[in-house]
Every structure is written in C-alpha cells, then in structure tokens.
Image: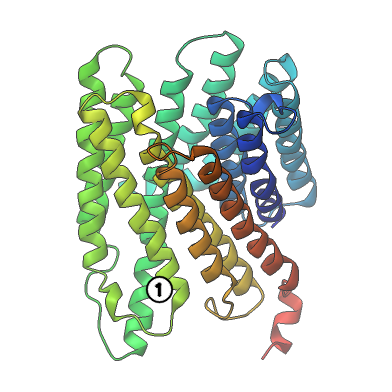
Amino acid sequence: MVFFPLATAYAIVVVPASVLSMLGMVPAVPGLASPAGHAHELLFGFALAVVAGNQLGPRRRASLVILAGLWLLARAAFLGWPGSAAAHAANIAFPASLAAVLAPRLLASAKKWRNQSLPLTLMGICASAVGFAILSALRAAALERVLDVAVALFAMLLLFMGGRLIAPSVAGQLQRQGRVLAARVQPRIEGALIVVMAISVIALALGDAHAAFVRAAGVALILAALLAVLRMIRWHLWALRGRPDLVCLAAGYAWLALGLAAFGTGLATGAPPGARTGAIHVITVGSLGTLTLNVMAMTRLLRARLPAGSSRLPVYATLLLALATVLRVFAGPVADTRAMLLAAAACWSMAYVLLLVLLAITPIVAPAQSRSVG
C-alpha cells in the first residue's frame, strides 16, 4: 500500500506547484513550469503511482522499496532537472520496471480477450511514459501526441476498471434493496468499448502521419462516450439508496463519458490543441481524479474491514474535484483566468488532503488480526 500514500501526497503538492510556477507566482519548479511538464507529472507521476498501488498486489518489501525508490528518483529528477540524463533514465526505469513486474502475472491470468485488454492497456501506459522520456532526450516534437495517446490509454483503463468495479457493487446494493440488476458487466458493450478505444489510441499514435487519423480517433472517442453513457443507464444508478460511495464512483465514470465526448469532438472537428485543453481536464481532473481518489479510499476502508461507504470524506473530496473540474474548464473563456486556475488547484489539493486524512486515520487490519475484528 506504499504507493497510495505516495500518490496522494504528491497529488496535494504537484498541481498547485505547477499552476503557481506557470503563473510566475513562485520561483518556478523547472519540471512543472510548462503544460507538458504539468501533464507529465499528473499522468506519469501521480496516476502511474496509483496504478502501481492498485495492480501490484502483495509483494516482498525489497521489491516495493526498489519500485518506490525508482518512482521517487524519477519525480525528483524530473522536477529539478527535467532535461537531464538522470531524469530521462529514471523516467524510463520506473515504468519499464513496473511493466516488467505486472505483465507476466496479468497476462498469464487473463483468459478472455476482454480481460487481456487490461494488461495490454497498462503496458501501453508504461510504454507511453518511456516514449515521452526518449523523445524528450532526443528533443523530438511529438511530445504532445504522446500525451494525447496517454490520456486515451488512461481513459481506456478507467472505462474497463470502472465498469468492473461499479457494476457488481451496484448490483449487490440493488439486490439488498430488493431489486435485480440484469445488466452488470455488459460484455458486448465492454468489448465494443475496448475496440473503439484501441482504434482511438492507434489513430492518435499515427496522427502525425495524416490528419485523417486524428479525425478517426475523434470519432472513436465519441462512440466510446456514447457506449459509456448507455452502460451507465443500464446500471440503474438512480435507484441506489444509502451508498454515496457508489454515487461518487458513478460521478467519475460520468465525467469520463463527458470528457471523451468533448475530446473526441475537438479531434474530429480539427480544433487546435489549446481548444481541447478543457476536454482533457474533464478526463484528467474530473474522471481520473475522482475515480482514483475513490478507489484508493474504498481499498483502504475494505482493508480495514470497514464498509466502503463508512466515511464521508471521499464524498466531500468528490465534490471538491467536481468544483475543480468546472473551474478549470471555464478558466479559459472568463476574464479572471488566474483566480480560477488557483481556485481549481486549491480544490484539487483539498480533495487529496481529505484522502490523506482518511489513509492516516484508517488502520490496515493484518490478516492474522482479522478474526478478532467484528
């Protein structure tokens, strides 16, 4: 569980540090003083640490220490010296090591082709992190394209993992309420989501070759958004009673559908990168932020043998992330952009402060102790 506290603490400081650096309000942190650096640390620093915490499972202390050490080294090197050989090497070593640890176990356990999409998506995310570091070292001009691919891969991961988590949890709660949910994982819709998201990732990766690939990626993302909405409708989320934790997860999934629709529309219509910034933040702040926060909170509560909905802190944090998303999306079109960016960063940080409090006050029950827990 070492990566969840690390990711949470990093989330608290990295976004406001980046915003303050780019606005020139503090001495600039070199790795965070550009939009590309900001995106790099949100995706390959924060989000990849959450992926590690969620997917590594029980491991020997030495293995965790090595992986956590590589992550910390990569963060320190990138923040202070983003163009250095040390930063490039560390930001290749961590995702490559994580992929080497995850791939054999996940690929061996995945029998159905839909399940195999999880390890392949994770490998794609790690590969995009490595690709960013290599292209940075070569001073190539394709960094923006790599970040777009990474956003699509994280969206693909959230669609898959979110569906696998939300569907059975909602079905179980509705059953306790005396209702039966027939549409759970919805394998046909899940399979279609995997296919269209894979098309979008490939098309985005080929986008520099021809503009038609970018438009194709946009259409695929719009289709994914429509499928995600259809999937949510069939979960009958409006019938939930007394489970704010599931409502929070559903909110993250809804942000994802909205963000994919907006991002896809921007790509399909040929909107310039600046015009797509709001859509990307709906995916990263709204969906990635909300889903990762609630998954970390739920995991910690369940490890403590507590009900997943026993704390209200994730609910307040989810509301803060919703406010952060709205503020960030509308920061461009309004006059006082600086104030809205600062307010969005503050809401993001406060949300993760609440998560850090939950992680600190919720003890993990060791397996040997679990029998005595009532």
Q: How is the image coloured?
A: rainbow
The residue nearer to you, when weighing 9 against 119, is: 9
What's under tag 1, amino acid-wise? Ser
Q: Across the whole image, how many numbered discs are drawn on residues?
A: 1
Residue positioned 70% across, 55% down in the render: 5
Above/below status of 316 relative to 149:
below
Side of 127 relative to 239 (left or right): right
Above/below status of 36 relative to 137:
below
Side of 193 relative to 316 (left or right): left
Residue positioned 38% across, 27% down in the render: 274
Q: Quadrant of the N terminus?
A: bottom right
The residue nearer to you, when weighing 42 against 160, is: 42
Residue 138 % position (x, y): 57, 8
The residue nearer to you, when weighing 316 against 157, is: 316
Residue 230 % position (x, y): 20, 59
Give SS at disc 1: helix
Residue 68 % position (x, y): 74, 42
Residue 334 % position (x, y): 40, 40
Residue 317 visible to an observer of this rendering: yes
Q: Which residue is mark 1?
A: 169
> Which residue is at the far front?
335
Q: Quadrant of residue 224?
A: top left
Q: Quadrant of the C terminus?
A: bottom right
Other-residue count near label 1 (Cα within 10 Å), few / some / many at <14 / 14–19 / ≥20: some
Residue 112 visible to an observer of this rendering: no
